[in-house]
Image (cartoon, rainbow, N blue to C red):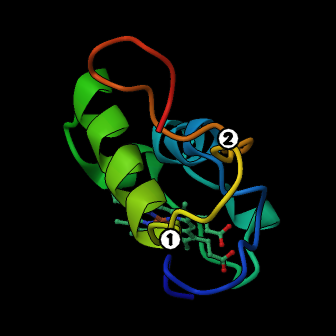
Amino acid sequence: MALTGALWLHGPGTYEWVAEQIRRGIPAYRSMSGLAMPMRGWSMMNDDEVRAVAAYVWSITHPPRVPGPGPATVLSDGGPPLPCGRGRL
Ligand code: HEM
């Protein structure tokens, strides 16, 4: 299933969760297809690169919302941390 699909097969799809799937991979016994996902997708990514990939995956699965009237809505699903250190996307 494409990562941009409407459904997460294995968990909530939050930024922290996506990062954890990339770090740990998915064992075959937990996979829907019976295929395992290798840790870090078999790459030599370091932790910063894992976080960058997770932020990208999170961003393509959370399209920007159109600002509406009323107080700003706060995302509750743990988007990537902002580079300035002031909270999350
Ligand atoms: C860095 C690149 C990759 C990222 C960001 C990534 C991310 C993910 C995520 C977030 C899931 C969970 C999807 C869900 O719950 O719906 C997943 C599942 C999976 N990934 Fe990856 N992955 C990567 C690389 C790879 C590679 C290289 C392989 C194969 C060699 C692979 C094989 C799989 C498999 C087999 C599953 C489980 C699918 C199922 O349950 O049927 N992934 N991946």
Instruction: Establish if 57 lies above or below 49.
Output: below
Q: Nearer the viewer, residue 68 or 58?
A: 68
- x, y percent for residue 50: 33, 37
Residue extending furthest top?
A: 85
> Does residue 37 appear to the left or right of 40 in the view shown?
right
To which quarter of the image does residue 64 belong?
bottom left
Give the camera-side residue of 7 and 65. Answer: 65
Q: CA distance from mark 1 to mark 2?
A: 13 Å
How crowded pointer 1 is (Cα within 10 Å; few <14, some 14-19, many 20+) is rated as few
**Residue that appears at 68% across and 55% down:** 27
User: Can the viewer see residue 46?
Assistant: no
Quadrant where the image shows the N terminus: bottom right
User: Which labelled disc corresponds to residue 66?
Assistant: 1
Q: Of the residues shown, which amino acid type is indicated by label 1? A: Val
- Residue in the picture at 69% in, 65% down: 28
Mark 2 residue type: Val
**Dot 1 lies on which element?**
loop
Give how far across and how far down residue 33 sits, in percent.
69, 85
Res 82 label: none
User: Mark 1 CB in 8 Å range of ligand 1?
Assistant: no
Write the residue at 65% across / 48% down: 14
Determine which residue is flagged by label 2.
Answer: 74
Pick the residue in front: 22 or 62: 62
86 relative to 48 in the view: left or right: right
Whether residue 84 is situated above or below residue 9 in the rendered picture: above
